[in-house]
Each structure stands twice: as C-alpha cells, then as structure tokens.
Image (cartoon, grey):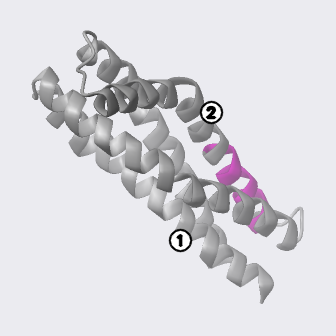
Amino acid sequence: MLANVLLIFAILSVGVVYGVDVFFAVVGRPALAASDEDAIANVMGHLHKIADARMPIFGIFGVLTTFTFAIVSQIGTISSWLALIALAGLLIQLSLYLTVAKPVNQKMTKAVQLGNIPNNTRELQNRWDSVIIVRALAMTLAIGCLLVSGILF
C-alpha cells in the first residue's frame, strides 16, 4: 500500500516537471526563437521569477518519492530498478537545470525586476535552450520508467 501511494505521488510530481520541460522543448523553444529580444526578456524574466519559486516543490517531492519508492518496492525487483533509472533521469534533469538553466533564470529574473533588458538576451535564451531537449528526454525517461514500474508492481 505504501509503495502504491509513493508511486502515485512520484508520478504526479514528476509529471508536472515533465510537462513543463516537454512544453518548452516542443513549443516554447521555437516560439522564443521567433520572438524579439524585448519580448523574450520580459516574458521569460517573469516566468522564471514565478517558476523558480514554485517548481522546486514538485522536483524535490518527485525525487524523494521516486527514491523512497525504489527502496520500498523491494530492492532488486524490476520495479525498483525502473525507479532507480527514473531517479537517474531526474538527477540528470536537475543537474542540467542547476548548472545551465538556473543561472540564466536568475539573470533574466533580476533584469525584469530592475526593469532592464539584458544586452545578451538572445545569448542567454540560447544557453537555456541548449539543454531543454536533453532535460525533456531525461524527464521522459523518468516518467516512462515510473509508469512501467507501476504496471509491473
């Protein structure tokens, strides 16, 4: 019973981050590439300000519930291995977020708070975009493994 509850919460939490990353990989990235720098700076600065305050709860909860599910679902079973692979996907996504995306987010957020448009807006957005497909793929791996684990559990 505990394992089922953990798995449900893991899928729901990871699903939020998965949806955001896939949306930006498929829709946001090409839309922003067609936008002017003022629009990118304004919209992305505000998005990052709000998202960086609200999204960590889903990421942290997803990592914790996935890890706990891997332990509770009897180490060595296919379900536990799939949960560990999901955890690896989550950690890959998190490391790319922390090392590449978050520094960009902070610069864009600071600029919008000061009412500025960075001279290098396009460069900052390109840097952020450079990892979004890999982040989305890592999240796809994670959510896929959690779903299959649930079917097999």
Q: Quadrant of the N terminus?
A: bottom right
In the rendered view, would you say 111 is above or below 22? Answer: above
Separation (CA) of disc 1 from disc 2 = 21 Å
Q: Residue 110 carries which label?
A: none
For the C terminus, give its image quadrant: bottom right
Label 2: which residue? Answer: 95
Q: Which residues are drawn in magenta? A: 79-89
Q: Which amino acid type corresponds to the residue marked 2 in the rendered image?
A: Ser
Q: What element carries label 1?
A: helix
Give percent across and percent down for residue 2.
79, 84
- Toward the bottom, the furthest residue is 1
Characterize the magenta stretch by its predominant secondary structure.
Answer: helix
In the image, is 2 to the left or to the right of 38?
right
Name the residue located 30 percent from the left edge and 49 percent from the top edge. 23
Tell me residue 34's x, y (percent). Answer: 10, 28
Residue 25, image x and y in percent? Answer: 32, 40
Q: Which of 105 and 91 is in front in this view?
A: 105
Q: Residue at x 25, y 9 (%)?
A: 119
> What's the residue type where badge 1 is placed?
Leu
Any magenta on residue 81? yes
Image: 15 above or below 99: below
Q: Where is residue 28 in the image (x, y as percent from the top left)?
A: 24, 41
Q: Quadrant of residue 116?
A: top left
**Vertically, is 147 above or below 28?**
below
Number of residues whose C-alpha sits closer than 10 Å to that of mark 2, classed few (under 14), some (14–19) or many (20 or more): some
